[in-house]
Image (tube, rainbow, N blue to C red):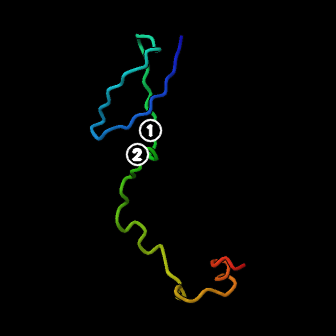
Amino acid sequence: MQAAVKLTILIPPDRRVEITFPEELPPGPAEVIVLTSSQDTGQRPPRPMGLDVGKGWVAEDFDAPLPQDLQELFEGKS
């Protein structure tokens, strides 16, 4: 008989976890599979400084007023 149980845990910085399996799992050999995602930790590796230097630009008219019709869309008047 095979059984599967999903346990949700938070992996601590020392990467050590003690697991207590549910009673319905029989004793004996088992396989443990760890699935992780970066979403769960909320952390990403830091990006190197200057990675995108020179790849962006700001238009000359960045601070210019918007055209009236576009301004009205932002204000919900349309």
Residue ID at (41%, 10%)? 27
Q: Nearer the viewer, residue 57 or 11?
A: 11
- Structural crowding at the residue carrying mark 2, measured as other residues with C-alpha within 10 Å and reported as few (<14), some (14–19) or many (≥20): few
Q: Position of residue 11 (x, y in %)?
A: 35, 37
Q: Position of residue 63 (x, y in %)?
A: 52, 87
- Structural crowding at the residue carrying mark 1, measured as other residues with C-alpha within 10 Å and reported as few (<14), some (14–19) or many (≥20): few
Left/right of residue 26 with respect to residue 13 in the rendered view = right
Reply above or below: 3 against 62: above
Q: Residue beneath label 1, please?
A: 36
Q: Which mark is residue 66?
A: none
Disc 2 residue type (three-letter) = Thr
Instruction: Say what secondary structure mark 2 lies in.
Output: helix
Disc 1 residue type (three-letter) = Thr
Q: Position of residue 51 (x, y in %)?
A: 40, 66
Reply above or below: 34 against 62: above
* Residue 33 falls in image quadrant: top left
On the rendered image, what quadrant is the C terminus found in?
bottom right
Q: Position of residue 57 (x, y in %)?
A: 49, 79
On the rendered image, what quadrant is the N terminus found in?
top right
Left/right of residue 33 with respect to residue 14 in the rendered view = right
Q: Which is more foreground, mark 2 or mark 1?
A: 2
Q: Residue beneath label 2, please?
A: 41
Left/right of residue 18 with respect to residue 69 in the rendered view = left
* Residue 48 falls in image quadrant: bottom left
Residue ID at (44%, 75%)? 54
Label pair 2/1, CB-CB below 8 angstroms: yes
Residue ID at (37%, 53%)? 45
Reply above or below: 58 against 23: below
- Mark 2 and mark 1 lie on one chain; the one further toward the N terminus is 1
